[in-house]
Image (tube, rainbow, N blue to C red):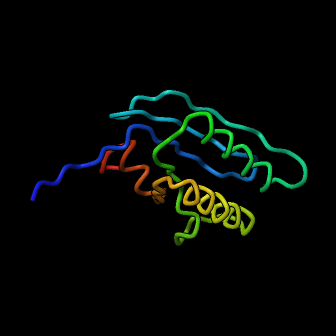
């Protein structure tokens, strides 16, 4: 039987924070297209953050969405961020995106190597 590995051509990584969202869009073997932060202030932060994620997905058309594991032991994320994470994940799955959730430890290993 012949298997071939599907490579994701574009990924959108989103960091959900108390002040908004950080994001990075990568293509191919880690080519950074763009990164940035969107500050969200005053009221209805979750709906505003979700709207911002929707706009990013619409603009960049990623194959996958990468999120931080906000429920991992020691993540220290507030209940509001955990709710937002579930909303973003549901949106991405509804759009048929591959959703990958990684821990802070995994992120450090990817960015800094296994020594850190």
Q: Residue furthest left?
A: 1
Horizontal side of residue 58 vs 98, given as left or right: right
Horizontal side of residue 90 vs 80, given as left or right: left
Q: Front-most of 116 and 17?
A: 17
Q: Position of residue 43 (x, y in %)?
A: 90, 53
Residue, x 62% and y 39% (percent of image)?
58
Displayed quadrant of residue 111? top left
Q: Residue furthest front?
A: 1
Residue, x 85% and y 45% (percent of image)?
41
Q: Which quadrant, please, contains the N terminus?
A: bottom left
Residue 65 against residue 101 in the figure, above or below: above
Q: Front-most of 91 and 101?
A: 91
Residue 79 against residue 10 in the figure, above or below: below
Q: Position of residue 105 (x, y in %)?
A: 43, 57
Q: Position of residue 46 (x, y in %)?
A: 77, 56
Displayed quadrant of residue 29? top left
Q: Position of residue 10 (x, y in %)?
A: 44, 38
């Amino acid at each position: 039987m012949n298997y071939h590995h599907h490579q994701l051509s574009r990924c959108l990584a989103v960091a959900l924070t108390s002040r908004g969202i950080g994001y990075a869009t990568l293509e191919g073997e880690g080519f950074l297209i763009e990164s940035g932060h969107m500050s969200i202030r005053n009221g209805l932060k979750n709906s505003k953050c979700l709207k911002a994620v929707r706009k990013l997905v619409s603009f960049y058309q990623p194959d996958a969405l990468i999120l931080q594991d906000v429920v991992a032991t020691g993540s220290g994320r507030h209940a509001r961020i955990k709710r937002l994470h579930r909303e973003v994940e549901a949106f991405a799955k509804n759009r048929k995106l591959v959703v990958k959730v990684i821990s802070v430890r995994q992120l450090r290993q990817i960015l800094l190597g296994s020594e850190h």
